[in-house]
């Protein structure tokens, strides 16, 4: 059964037609990698799911509920966590407050303490520091950890490896693999090596359209497709 | 690490890091220099004053600064979170003063006006319902386009028709015996009585119903005007509860108004002043929330429009005040607890703040208990209260996060629009509190809003537009500077080799804070506490 389904979604930002027909299936308990070149519309797809850039037509269905016209905070409240590109850590908040603000019920952070600090032990040490004093890698960990605090059924993760040193990419991949054991993940990733090792299935977006999807294992050997849609 | 490319990367990272540290030091050096010279100037000005004047000048500066702070803090909170320059903020300050005066001096009139206002506000609590109906009506045809305007016109006619049928105890804005000015004198003498009540021109129920229908038609018109499908808020029992509460409140208030008036008129002016403060803050907050939901919310992505509409709202409020309260300027009588004279007055020392005297003497300086005591105390309380709210509560955390990235806050499952409304209400409530506090010391006038908003904006520019502590620091500086210049205008500054002491003229008072702003912005472009533009 699909946890999330996008059917022929069209999205405009201002007058620009950014998504021109995106259809995605995200099966329950899977990791789906959203692939495509820069500017293909991957980030907009995630924002459209969350209602941050609402779809003009088509449908977004989460757990059988049509959420196309819901407001963002309602959509997030259904159990969708978002790890945006560039992390969006709140600078005026401490690390703890950055986690605390994601609580949907009082005490979420205490309940998820083991999970969050198990995956990212560094954060426990930094808990009282202001958000801006963290390094890029630490901020990325905080952004993922923030999405883990409430009971989310689906995580939308945008470019987790961007700007990270190789050793940190390994660590981040390990964390995402580990959390995908109990959460469904829709992952946007430019780095094909990372995407291919995390994703079970893939969807390729090209110029605002979803053009191809399937099992990740099939794509890895398919040099022609990789060259055509992802090659630089 | 032998790869030259890698080494170069590490080195350039180190270089940029060093540069950042150097920049930070440089910025803080400028800041430290500014603070040091401000302190030096302050001490120099203080030492130039007579021994019996420095303390009262200091406290007068704090008092004026506290009022400026109450205006500036709300303006800053709203601008910081929503990027809206609320040019009606000064008029909300003014409205706070006038509403406070009315509750304090003419509680009977206030109750009479509040009853229809509550009935009128009730249908607006059903906005989700009107939006839904509005979406059905909206369309491309001529009739569908005209419909919202038709509803609004019909609503306005019904409201005017019915509201004039409510019995309003109103003073005569021009006649001598019943003017606001006279009432202030009467309350000082303790001889103010409720005015004789008018009677209803229509049966109670019909007037209530027509007013409610008028409000509903108006709200429907507004909702239909911007109807677009999708993204609706559901109509919940909370909305229905709000409507029921507002209508029930109006009915109860109408039924108990005679005993309520008698009770309030029997209270001491001190209690009436506290009631006036509470009502004024509530009224300001409600007005702010109303303005945000109805006028500003549709325009968040068009900053110029919000600027224009708040400017317009400000003018409407000024003219409303002029129409309702008549006389352009009058003062509010000081509450009894701060207005005592006679035996033991003026009191000595800091304990004198609680003596009930109108003045006291500290360090040989004569202070007014209300102006230099109570106002300063309220300013400090608000500073502490809002700081605690921002730093220690969940909504404060949401506000601090929303200042940076409202979209991300929304994506975490928080209704940011509601936080916007709450902050608008908070800021407007603080402005109204400033207004009612200023009424007995500075007095009421329709121009007070514009004057204080301008001063507050100067204070914010000095302190840093993006920083709440900056609002406090800027207001404090402007308050001190203005009062010091006023005092120096009386005593004069001795300048070496000049025979006559230099006496700053009154026009230099506002000019001085502008000059201070220019100098500080030249050295610290983001203000004392502001962060650089992002």
Image: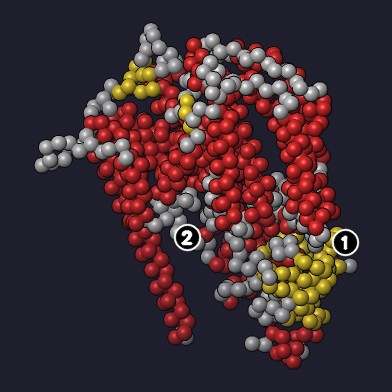
Q: Provide residue A14's location: percent of width, then percent of height.
A: 67, 68
Q: Which chain carries label 2?
A: B
Q: Residue furthest bottom?
A: A224
Q: Mark 1 lies on which chain?
A: A
Residue B533: image tag? 2
Residue A64: image tag? 1
Q: Is A232 left, or right, of A60 in this rendering?
A: left
Residue A219 found in image quarter: bottom right
Callout 2: helix, strand or loop? loop
Mark 2 on the same chain as mark 1: no
Q: Is B507 left, or right, of B334 in this rendering?
A: left
The residue depicted at 72 percent of the width and 69 percent of the height is A12
Real-space CA distance between mark 2 and mark 1, rounded to the nearest whole angstrom:
44 Å
**Front-lying residue, B481 or B312:** B312
Q: Provide residue B405's location: percent of width, then percent of height.
A: 60, 58
**Image height check: is A92 above or below B99?**
below
**Image height check: is B156 above or below B440?**
below
Q: Is A110 left, or right, of B48 in this rendering?
A: right
**Front-lying residue, B203 or B268:** B203
Crowd rating for badge 2 (residues with CA inside 10 Å; few <14, some 14–19, many 20+):
few
> Which dot, 2 or 1, sits closer to the camera?
2
Q: Residue furthest front?
A: B175
Residue B465: image tag? none
Residue B283 found in image quarter: top right
The residue depicted at 73 percent of the width and 57 percent of the height is A72
The residue depicted at 69 percent of the width and 13 percent of the height is B259
Q: Residue furthest top?
A: B343
């Amino acid at each position: 059964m699909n946890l999330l389904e996008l059917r022929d979604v069209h999205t405009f930002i201002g007058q620009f037609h950014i998504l021109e027909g995106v259809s995605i299936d995200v099966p329950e308990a899977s990791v789906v990698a959203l692939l495509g070149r820069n500017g293909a519309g991957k980030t907009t797809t995630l924002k459209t799911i969350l209602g941050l850039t609402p779809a003009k037509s088509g449908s977004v269905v989460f757990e059988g509920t049509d959420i196309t016209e819901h407001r963002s905070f309602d959509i997030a409240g259904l159990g969708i966590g978002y790890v945006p590109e560039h992390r969006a850590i709140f600078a005026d908040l401490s690390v703890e407050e950055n986690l605390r603000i994601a609580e949907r019920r009082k005490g979420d952070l205490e309940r998820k303490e083991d999970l969050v600090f198990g995956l990212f032990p560094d954060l426990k040490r930094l808990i009282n520091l202001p958000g801006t004093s963290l390094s890029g890698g630490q901020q990325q960990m905080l952004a993922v950890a923030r999405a883990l605090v409430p009971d989310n059924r689906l995580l939308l993760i945008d470019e987790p490896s961007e700007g990270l040193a190789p050793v940190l990419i390994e660590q981040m991949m390990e964390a995402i693999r580990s959390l995908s054991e109990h959460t469904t993940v829709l992952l946007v990733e430019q780095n094909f090596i990372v995407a291919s090792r995390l994703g079970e299935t893939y969807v390729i977006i090209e110029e605002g359209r979803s053009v191809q999807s399937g099992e990740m294992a099939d794509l890895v050997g398919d040099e022609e497709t990789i060259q055509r849609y992802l090659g630089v | 690490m032998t790869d030259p490319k890698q080494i170069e990367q590490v080195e350039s990272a180190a270089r940029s890091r060093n540069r950042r540290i150097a920049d930070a030091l440089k910025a803080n050096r400028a800041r430290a220099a500014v603070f040091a010279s401000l302190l030096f100037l302050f001490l120099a000005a203080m030492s130039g004053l007579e021994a019996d004047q420095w303390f009262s000048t200091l406290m007068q500066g704090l008092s004026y600064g506290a009022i400026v702070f109450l205006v500036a803090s709300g303006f800053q909170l709203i601008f910081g979170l929503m990027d809206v320059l609320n040019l009606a903020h000064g008029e909300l300050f003014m409205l706070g003063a006038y509403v406070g005066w009315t509750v304090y001096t003419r509680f009977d009139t206030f109750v009479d006006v509040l009853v229809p206002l509550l009935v009128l506000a009730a249908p607006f609590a059903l906005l989700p319902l009107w939006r839904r109906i509005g979406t059905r009506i909206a369309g491309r045809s001529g009739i569908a386009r005209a419909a919202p305007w038709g509803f609004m016109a019909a609503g306005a006619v019904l409201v005017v028709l019915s509201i004039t049928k409510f019995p309003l105890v109103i003073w005569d804005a021009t006649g001598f015996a019943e003017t606001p000015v006279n009432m202030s004198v009467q309350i000082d003498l303790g001889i103010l009585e409720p005015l004789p009540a008018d009677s209803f021109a229509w049966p109670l129920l019909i007037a209530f119903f027509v007013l409610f229908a008028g409000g509903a038609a108006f709200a429907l018109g507004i909702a239909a005007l911007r109807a677009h499908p999708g993204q609706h808020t559901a109509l919940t029992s909370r909305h229905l509860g709000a409507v029921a509460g507002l209508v029930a409140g109006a009915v109860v208030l109408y039924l108990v108004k005679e005993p309520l008036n008698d009770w309030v008129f029997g209270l001491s002016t001190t209690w009436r002043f506290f009631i006036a403060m509470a009502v004024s803050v509530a009224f300001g907050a409600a007005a702010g929330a109303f303005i945000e939901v109805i006028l500003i919310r549709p325009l968040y992505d068009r900053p110029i429009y919000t600027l224009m509409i708040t400017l317009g709202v400000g003018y409407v409020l000024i003219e409303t005040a002029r129409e309702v309260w008549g006389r352009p300027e009058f003062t509010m009588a000081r509450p009894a607890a701060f207005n005592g004279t006679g035996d033991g007055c003026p009191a000595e020392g800091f304990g004198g703040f609680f003596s009930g005297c109108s003045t006291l003497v500290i360090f040989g300086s004569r202070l007014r208990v209300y102006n230099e005591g109570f106002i300063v105390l309220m300013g400090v309380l608000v500073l502490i209260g809002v700081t605690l709210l921002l730093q220690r509560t969940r909504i404060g955390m949401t506000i601090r996060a929303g200042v940076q990235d409202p979209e991300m806050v929304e994506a975490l499952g928080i209704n940011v629009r509601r936080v916007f409304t709450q902050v608008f209400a908070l800021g407007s409530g603080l402005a109204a509190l400033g207004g009612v506090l200023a009424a007995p010391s500075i007095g009421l006038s329709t121009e007070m809003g514009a004057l204080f908003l301008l001063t507050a904006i100067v204070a914010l520019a000095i302190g840093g537009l993006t920083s709440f502590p900056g609002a406090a620091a800027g207001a404090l500086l402007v308050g001190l500077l203005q009062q010091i210049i006023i005092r120096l205008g009386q005593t004069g500054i001795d300048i070496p080799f000049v025979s006559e002491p230099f006496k700053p003229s009154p026009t230099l008072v506002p000019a001085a804070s502008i000059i201070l702003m220019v100098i500080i912005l030249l050295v610290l472009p983001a203000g004392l506490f502001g962060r650089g533009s992002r």
